[in-house]
Protein backbone atom coordinates (compact mmCIF):
# COMPACT_ATOMS: atom_id res chain seq x y z
CA UNK A 1 0.00 0.00 0.00
CA UNK A 2 1.29 3.44 -0.89
CA UNK A 3 1.84 5.39 2.30
CA UNK A 4 0.54 8.94 2.69
CA UNK A 5 3.35 11.47 2.24
CA UNK A 6 5.02 12.28 5.59
CA UNK A 7 5.21 16.02 4.87
CA UNK A 8 3.93 18.91 2.81
CA UNK A 9 5.91 21.57 0.98
CA UNK A 10 6.58 24.55 3.23
CA UNK A 11 6.68 22.53 6.47
CA UNK A 12 9.67 22.85 8.73
CA UNK A 13 11.95 19.80 8.91
CA UNK A 14 11.08 19.41 12.60
CA UNK A 15 7.45 18.83 11.61
CA UNK A 16 8.05 15.98 9.15
CA UNK A 17 6.45 12.69 10.21
CA UNK A 18 8.99 10.03 11.11
CA UNK A 19 10.69 7.88 10.09
CA UNK A 20 11.08 9.69 6.77
CA UNK A 21 13.50 9.55 3.87
CA UNK A 22 15.06 12.99 3.57
CA UNK A 23 17.09 14.51 0.74
CA UNK A 24 19.22 17.57 1.43
CA UNK A 25 18.56 19.18 -1.95
CA UNK A 26 21.63 21.43 -1.94
CA UNK A 27 23.96 18.47 -1.35
CA UNK A 28 22.06 16.26 -3.81
CA UNK A 29 22.18 18.82 -6.61
CA UNK A 30 25.86 19.46 -5.91
CA UNK A 31 26.53 15.72 -6.32
CA UNK A 32 24.65 15.56 -9.62
CA UNK A 33 26.49 18.65 -10.87
CA UNK A 34 29.87 17.30 -9.74
CA UNK A 35 29.46 14.01 -11.61
CA UNK A 36 28.21 15.79 -14.74
CA UNK A 37 31.21 18.17 -14.61
CA UNK A 38 33.64 15.28 -14.12
CA UNK A 39 32.33 13.40 -17.15
CA UNK A 40 32.08 16.40 -19.48
CA UNK A 41 34.58 16.06 -22.28
CA UNK A 42 35.80 12.59 -21.27
CA UNK A 43 33.96 10.70 -24.00
CA UNK A 44 32.26 8.58 -21.35
CA UNK A 45 28.64 9.21 -20.43
CA UNK A 46 26.74 8.64 -17.25
CA UNK A 47 24.11 5.92 -17.29
CA UNK A 48 23.21 6.35 -13.64
CA UNK A 49 22.09 3.27 -11.76
CA UNK A 50 18.48 3.59 -10.67
CA UNK A 51 18.83 0.68 -8.24
CA UNK A 52 19.91 3.42 -5.83
CA UNK A 53 17.17 6.02 -6.24
CA UNK A 54 14.31 4.00 -7.80
CA UNK A 55 12.74 7.23 -8.95
CA UNK A 56 11.79 8.65 -12.34
CA UNK A 57 11.91 12.13 -10.76
CA UNK A 58 15.60 11.70 -9.98
CA UNK A 59 16.38 9.97 -13.28
CA UNK A 60 15.13 13.03 -15.14
CA UNK A 61 17.38 15.32 -13.10
CA UNK A 62 20.40 13.16 -13.99
CA UNK A 63 19.46 13.12 -17.66
CA UNK A 64 18.96 16.89 -17.70
CA UNK A 65 22.62 17.07 -16.71
CA UNK A 66 23.79 14.84 -19.54
CA UNK A 67 23.16 11.23 -18.47
CA UNK A 68 22.30 9.09 -21.51
CA UNK A 69 19.74 7.11 -19.57
CA UNK A 70 19.45 4.78 -16.63
CA UNK A 71 20.50 1.33 -15.53
CA UNK A 72 18.10 -0.87 -13.64
CA UNK A 73 18.51 -4.25 -12.03
CA UNK A 74 14.99 -5.59 -12.51
CA UNK A 75 12.19 -5.64 -15.04
CA UNK A 76 9.82 -3.96 -12.57
CA UNK A 77 12.27 -1.06 -12.23
CA UNK A 78 12.50 -0.79 -16.02
CA UNK A 79 8.72 -0.59 -16.20
CA UNK A 80 8.43 2.08 -13.52
CA UNK A 81 11.06 4.25 -15.21
CA UNK A 82 9.74 3.77 -18.75
CA UNK A 83 6.23 4.63 -17.58
CA UNK A 84 7.81 7.64 -15.88
CA UNK A 85 9.17 8.90 -19.20
CA UNK A 86 12.79 7.64 -19.08
CA UNK A 87 13.63 7.02 -22.75
CA UNK A 88 16.76 4.83 -22.54
CA UNK A 89 17.11 1.96 -20.07
CA UNK A 90 19.67 -0.83 -19.66
CA UNK A 91 18.80 -3.81 -17.49
CA UNK A 92 22.37 -4.32 -16.22
CA UNK A 93 21.53 -7.88 -15.31
CA UNK A 94 20.50 -11.20 -16.76
CA UNK A 95 16.80 -11.78 -17.48
CA UNK A 96 16.22 -15.43 -18.38
CA UNK A 97 12.51 -15.89 -17.82
CA UNK A 98 10.44 -15.66 -21.02
CA UNK A 99 7.52 -13.97 -19.27
CA UNK A 100 9.75 -11.23 -17.89
CA UNK A 101 11.39 -10.87 -21.29
CA UNK A 102 7.97 -10.40 -22.88
CA UNK A 103 7.39 -7.52 -20.47
CA UNK A 104 10.69 -5.97 -21.56
CA UNK A 105 9.81 -6.46 -25.23
CA UNK A 106 6.48 -4.73 -24.63
CA UNK A 107 8.26 -1.82 -22.95
CA UNK A 108 10.48 -1.31 -25.93
CA UNK A 109 7.44 0.29 -27.57
CA UNK A 110 7.86 3.35 -25.32
CA UNK A 111 11.59 3.34 -24.46
CA UNK A 112 14.87 2.01 -25.77
CA UNK A 113 15.49 -1.04 -23.61
CA UNK A 114 18.60 -3.25 -23.53
CA UNK A 115 19.38 -6.30 -21.42
CA UNK A 116 22.45 -8.37 -20.50
CA UNK A 117 23.18 -12.03 -21.15
CA UNK A 118 25.95 -14.43 -20.18
CA UNK A 119 24.65 -17.69 -21.67
CA UNK A 120 23.90 -19.01 -25.16
CA UNK A 121 20.54 -20.52 -24.19
CA UNK A 122 19.62 -17.24 -22.50
CA UNK A 123 20.37 -15.39 -25.75
CA UNK A 124 18.19 -17.82 -27.69
CA UNK A 125 15.31 -17.19 -25.29
CA UNK A 126 15.64 -13.43 -25.77
CA UNK A 127 15.72 -13.91 -29.55
CA UNK A 128 12.59 -16.09 -29.47
CA UNK A 129 10.71 -13.54 -27.35
CA UNK A 130 11.86 -10.67 -29.59
CA UNK A 131 10.74 -12.57 -32.70
CA UNK A 132 7.32 -13.34 -31.22
CA UNK A 133 6.93 -9.70 -30.16
CA UNK A 134 7.99 -8.45 -33.58
CA UNK A 135 10.75 -6.27 -32.08
CA UNK A 136 14.55 -6.29 -32.20
CA UNK A 137 16.05 -6.35 -28.74
CA UNK A 138 19.48 -5.00 -27.81
CA UNK A 139 21.65 -7.37 -25.77
CA UNK A 140 24.99 -6.74 -24.02
CA UNK A 141 27.30 -9.59 -23.07
CA UNK A 142 28.22 -9.49 -19.40
CA UNK A 143 31.80 -10.37 -18.60
CA UNK A 144 33.11 -11.18 -15.15
CA UNK A 145 35.87 -8.64 -14.59
CA UNK A 146 36.76 -9.83 -11.11
CA UNK A 147 33.67 -9.72 -8.93
CA UNK A 148 32.94 -13.42 -9.41
CA UNK A 149 29.23 -12.77 -9.84
CA UNK A 150 27.43 -12.90 -13.21
CA UNK A 151 29.24 -12.85 -16.52
CA UNK A 152 31.42 -15.11 -18.66
CA UNK A 153 35.18 -14.83 -18.70
CA UNK A 154 36.61 -12.05 -20.84
CA UNK A 155 37.95 -13.26 -24.18
CA UNK A 156 36.76 -16.03 -26.51
CA UNK A 157 33.68 -17.05 -24.50
CA UNK A 158 32.37 -13.49 -24.52
CA UNK A 159 33.19 -13.09 -28.21
CA UNK A 160 31.26 -16.28 -29.03
CA UNK A 161 28.17 -14.93 -27.23
CA UNK A 162 28.51 -11.58 -28.99
CA UNK A 163 28.66 -13.42 -32.31
CA UNK A 164 25.53 -15.35 -31.46
CA UNK A 165 23.66 -12.10 -30.69
CA UNK A 166 24.94 -10.39 -33.82
CA UNK A 167 23.91 -13.37 -35.96
CA UNK A 168 20.28 -13.20 -34.82
CA UNK A 169 17.97 -11.10 -37.00
CA UNK A 170 15.92 -10.37 -33.85
CA UNK A 171 18.78 -9.06 -31.70
CA UNK A 172 21.31 -6.24 -31.74
CA UNK A 173 24.72 -6.65 -30.12
CA UNK A 174 24.95 -3.65 -27.80
CA UNK A 175 28.40 -4.19 -26.30
CA UNK A 176 29.87 -5.40 -23.02
CA UNK A 177 28.67 -5.11 -19.44
CA UNK A 178 31.84 -4.99 -17.32
CA UNK A 179 31.03 -4.01 -13.74
CA UNK A 180 33.37 -4.87 -10.90
CA UNK A 181 31.00 -4.86 -7.94
CA UNK A 182 33.24 -6.06 -5.16
CA UNK A 183 35.86 -3.40 -5.95
CA UNK A 184 33.57 -0.52 -5.01
CA UNK A 185 33.89 -0.77 -1.26
CA UNK A 186 37.46 -2.06 -0.98
CA UNK A 187 38.82 0.20 1.67
CA UNK A 188 42.13 1.32 0.22
CA UNK A 189 42.61 3.21 -3.02
CA UNK A 190 45.43 0.79 -3.93
CA UNK A 191 43.13 -2.23 -3.67
CA UNK A 192 40.55 -0.54 -5.87
CA UNK A 193 43.22 0.48 -8.39
CA UNK A 194 44.54 -3.09 -8.63
CA UNK A 195 41.02 -4.49 -9.09
CA UNK A 196 40.13 -2.08 -11.91
CA UNK A 197 43.52 -2.60 -13.59
CA UNK A 198 42.60 -6.30 -13.83
CA UNK A 199 39.12 -5.44 -15.10
CA UNK A 200 40.57 -3.11 -17.75
CA UNK A 201 42.88 -5.83 -18.99
CA UNK A 202 39.89 -8.15 -19.54
CA UNK A 203 37.87 -5.45 -21.28
CA UNK A 204 40.76 -4.41 -23.55
CA UNK A 205 41.42 -7.99 -24.59
CA UNK A 206 37.75 -8.71 -25.28
CA UNK A 207 37.14 -5.54 -27.30
CA UNK A 208 40.23 -6.33 -29.37
CA UNK A 209 39.06 -9.88 -30.06
CA UNK A 210 35.59 -8.63 -30.98
CA UNK A 211 37.20 -6.28 -33.48
CA UNK A 212 39.20 -9.14 -34.96
CA UNK A 213 35.89 -10.94 -35.56
CA UNK A 214 34.49 -7.83 -37.22
CA UNK A 215 32.23 -7.03 -34.27
CA UNK A 216 31.92 -3.43 -33.21
CA UNK A 217 31.43 -2.87 -29.47
CA UNK A 218 29.37 0.31 -29.08
CA UNK A 219 28.96 0.20 -25.28
CA UNK A 220 31.33 -0.81 -22.51
CA UNK A 221 29.32 -0.30 -19.34
CA UNK A 222 30.36 -0.54 -15.71
CA UNK A 223 31.88 1.40 -12.79
CA UNK A 224 30.30 2.58 -9.58
CA UNK A 225 30.78 5.35 -7.08
CA UNK A 226 33.86 3.73 -5.55
CA UNK A 227 35.88 3.24 -8.73
CA UNK A 228 34.54 5.44 -11.56
CA UNK A 229 37.72 7.57 -11.60
CA UNK A 230 39.71 4.44 -12.39
CA UNK A 231 37.44 3.31 -15.23
CA UNK A 232 37.62 6.84 -16.65
CA UNK A 233 41.42 6.76 -16.46
CA UNK A 234 41.49 3.42 -18.28
CA UNK A 235 39.67 5.07 -21.20
CA UNK A 236 37.82 1.90 -22.18
CA UNK A 237 34.43 2.34 -20.54
CA UNK A 238 31.88 4.38 -22.52
CA UNK A 239 29.14 4.35 -19.87
CA UNK A 240 29.62 4.95 -16.15
CA UNK A 241 26.92 3.32 -14.03
CA UNK A 242 27.42 5.03 -10.67
CA UNK A 243 24.30 5.24 -8.52
CA UNK A 244 25.19 5.93 -4.89
CA UNK A 245 27.10 9.12 -5.78
CA UNK A 246 23.82 11.04 -5.71
CA UNK A 247 23.22 10.20 -2.04
CA UNK A 248 26.32 8.63 -0.49
CA UNK A 249 26.25 6.53 2.69
CA UNK A 250 28.35 5.72 5.74
CA UNK A 251 29.96 2.74 4.03
CA UNK A 252 31.23 4.81 1.10
CA UNK A 253 32.38 7.53 3.50
CA UNK A 254 34.51 4.87 5.25
CA UNK A 255 36.50 4.14 2.06
CA UNK A 256 40.08 5.39 2.09
CA UNK A 257 40.13 8.44 -0.23
CA UNK A 258 36.31 8.48 -0.31
CA UNK A 259 34.58 9.80 -3.42
CA UNK A 260 34.13 13.59 -3.47
CA UNK A 261 30.38 13.65 -2.94
CA UNK A 262 28.35 15.06 -0.07
CA UNK A 263 25.97 13.13 2.13
CA UNK A 264 22.54 14.07 0.81
CA UNK A 265 20.34 11.18 1.98
CA UNK A 266 19.11 10.85 5.54
CA UNK A 267 16.53 9.01 7.54
CA UNK A 268 14.78 11.46 9.81
CA UNK A 269 13.90 9.78 13.10
CA UNK A 270 12.30 10.88 16.37
CA UNK A 271 13.41 10.26 19.94
CA UNK A 272 10.54 8.24 21.41
CA UNK A 273 12.10 7.32 24.72
CA UNK A 274 14.91 8.62 26.90
CA UNK A 275 14.37 6.50 29.98
CA UNK A 276 17.67 6.96 31.79
CA UNK A 277 21.02 8.71 31.58
CA UNK A 278 23.12 7.52 28.65
CA UNK A 279 20.23 5.94 26.73
CA UNK A 280 17.74 7.19 24.16
CA UNK A 281 15.63 5.34 21.62
CA UNK A 282 14.63 6.39 18.09
CA UNK A 283 11.59 5.27 16.12
CA UNK A 284 13.89 3.99 13.36
CA UNK A 285 15.16 0.42 13.58
CA UNK A 286 16.27 -1.84 10.76
CA UNK A 287 12.87 -1.65 9.08
CA UNK A 288 13.57 2.06 8.60
CA UNK A 289 17.27 2.00 7.75
CA UNK A 290 19.35 -0.76 6.14
CA UNK A 291 22.04 -2.19 8.40
CA UNK A 292 23.62 -4.72 6.00
CA UNK A 293 26.69 -2.46 5.61
CA UNK A 294 26.79 -1.31 9.22
CA UNK A 295 24.72 0.79 11.59
CA UNK A 296 23.72 4.34 10.66
CA UNK A 297 25.61 7.35 11.95
CA UNK A 298 23.91 10.18 13.79
CA UNK A 299 24.39 13.37 11.75
CA UNK A 300 26.13 16.30 13.41
CA UNK A 301 25.30 15.41 16.98
CA UNK A 302 28.60 14.78 18.78
CA UNK A 303 28.20 12.51 21.79
CA UNK A 304 25.26 10.54 20.35
CA UNK A 305 25.85 7.19 18.64
CA UNK A 306 23.43 4.71 17.09
CA UNK A 307 24.40 1.44 18.72
CA UNK A 308 21.61 -1.06 18.12
CA UNK A 309 18.83 -1.69 15.60
CA UNK A 310 15.83 -3.88 16.26
CA UNK A 311 12.70 -4.00 14.08
CA UNK A 312 11.26 -0.62 15.06
CA UNK A 313 13.70 0.70 17.66
CA UNK A 314 17.04 2.39 17.23
CA UNK A 315 19.11 2.42 20.41
CA UNK A 316 21.33 5.43 21.02
CA UNK A 317 24.27 5.70 23.39
CA UNK A 318 24.40 9.21 24.75
CA UNK A 319 27.34 10.89 26.45
CA UNK A 320 26.79 13.29 29.34
CA UNK A 321 25.56 16.62 28.05
CA UNK A 322 24.44 15.33 24.63
CA UNK A 323 21.13 13.93 25.84
CA UNK A 324 18.42 14.53 23.19
CA UNK A 325 14.95 15.72 24.16
CA UNK A 326 11.93 13.48 23.95
CA UNK A 327 10.24 14.11 20.59
CA UNK A 328 13.39 15.62 19.09
CA UNK A 329 14.18 14.67 15.49
CA UNK A 330 17.65 13.47 14.50
CA UNK A 331 19.07 12.80 11.06
CA UNK A 332 20.66 9.41 10.44
CA UNK A 333 23.22 8.69 7.73
CA UNK A 334 22.35 5.19 6.43
CA UNK A 335 25.12 2.59 6.32
CA UNK A 336 23.88 1.63 2.84
CA UNK A 337 21.77 3.98 0.73
CA UNK A 338 20.16 1.65 -1.85
CA UNK A 339 18.24 -0.75 0.42
CA UNK A 340 17.32 2.13 2.74
CA UNK A 341 15.56 3.93 -0.11
CA UNK A 342 13.62 0.76 -0.94
CA UNK A 343 11.86 0.97 2.44
CA UNK A 344 10.06 4.25 1.60
CA UNK A 345 7.34 5.50 -0.73
CA UNK A 346 8.40 9.16 -0.62
CA UNK A 347 11.47 11.32 -0.69
CA UNK A 348 11.11 14.49 1.32
CA UNK A 349 13.31 17.16 -0.29
CA UNK A 350 14.50 19.81 2.18
CA UNK A 351 16.39 23.03 1.73
CA UNK A 352 17.23 25.59 4.38
CA UNK A 353 15.25 23.67 7.02
CA UNK A 354 12.02 23.65 4.97
CA UNK A 355 10.34 20.94 2.93
CA UNK A 356 10.50 21.92 -0.74
CA UNK A 357 9.21 18.86 -2.59
CA UNK A 358 7.97 15.29 -2.33
CA UNK A 359 9.05 12.76 -4.94
CA UNK A 360 7.62 9.24 -5.15
CA UNK A 361 10.07 6.31 -4.95
CA UNK A 362 8.18 5.05 -7.97
CA UNK A 363 10.23 1.91 -8.67
CA UNK A 364 10.43 0.72 -5.06
CA UNK A 365 9.59 -2.68 -3.81
CA UNK A 366 9.56 -4.26 -7.28
CA UNK A 367 10.55 -7.80 -6.41
CA UNK A 368 10.23 -8.86 -10.02
N1 LIG B 1 26.35 -1.06 -11.94
C1 LIG B 1 25.91 -2.25 -11.48
C2 LIG B 1 25.72 -3.37 -12.43
C3 LIG B 1 25.61 -2.42 -10.12
O1 LIG B 1 25.18 -3.60 -9.67
C4 LIG B 1 25.79 -1.31 -9.24
C5 LIG B 1 25.56 -1.45 -7.79
O2 LIG B 1 25.51 -2.49 -7.22
C6 LIG B 1 26.21 -0.09 -9.76
C7 LIG B 1 26.49 -0.01 -11.12
C8 LIG B 1 26.32 1.18 -8.95
O3 LIG B 1 27.12 1.18 -7.89
P1 LIG B 1 27.13 2.36 -6.82
O4 LIG B 1 25.74 2.53 -6.29
O5 LIG B 1 28.03 1.83 -5.80
O6 LIG B 1 27.59 3.59 -7.51
MN1 LIG C 1 24.87 -0.26 -2.83
Image (cartoon, grey):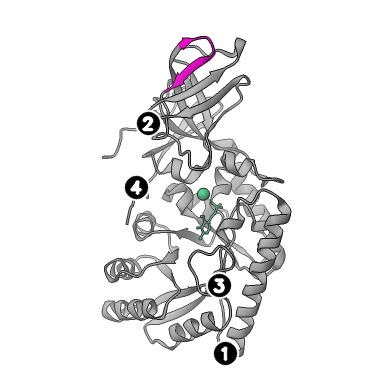
Q: Position of residue 267 (x, y in %)?
A: 47, 32
The first of marks 2 and 4 along the sequence is 2
Image quadrant for the N terminus? top left
Q: Is mark 3 within 8 Å of ligand 1?
A: no
Q: State how far apart marks 1 and 2 are (Cα).
A: 56 Å
Magenta part, dominant SS: strand
- Closer to the camera, 188 or 346? 188
Q: Residue at x 53, y 72 (%)?
A: 143
* Residue 333 visible to an observer of this rendering: yes
Looking at the rendering, which quadrant does residue 26 occupy?
Answer: top right
Is 69 situated above or below 17? Answer: below
Report which residue position mark 2 lands on.
Answer: 311
Residue 276 numbered tag = none
Q: Tell me the element at label 1.
A: loop
In the rendered structure, does residue 75 fall within the stretch colored magenta? no
Residue 214 numbered tag = 1
Looking at the rendering, which quadrant does residue 102 occupy?
Answer: bottom left
Please provide the residue range marked out in magenta: 275-282
Report which residue position mark 3 lands on.
Answer: 219
Q: State how far apart marks 1 and 4 are (Cα).
A: 42 Å
The first of marks 1 and 2 along the sequence is 1
Residue 365 numbered tag = 4
Q: Tell me the element at label 3.
A: strand
Is 199 situated above or below 257? Answer: below
Mark whose residue sits in front, 1 or 2: 2
Amino acid sequence: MLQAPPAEPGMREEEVDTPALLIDLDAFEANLDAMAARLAGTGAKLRAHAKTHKSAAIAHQQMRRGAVGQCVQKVAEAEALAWGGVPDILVSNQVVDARKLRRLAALSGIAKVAVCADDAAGIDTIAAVAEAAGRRMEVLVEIDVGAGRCGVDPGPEAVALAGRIAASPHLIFGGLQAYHGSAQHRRTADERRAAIAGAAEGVRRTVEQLRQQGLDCPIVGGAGTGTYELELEAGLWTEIQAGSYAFMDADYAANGAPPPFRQSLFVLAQVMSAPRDGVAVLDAGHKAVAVDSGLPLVWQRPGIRYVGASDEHGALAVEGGARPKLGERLRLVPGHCDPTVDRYDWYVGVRGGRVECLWPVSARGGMV
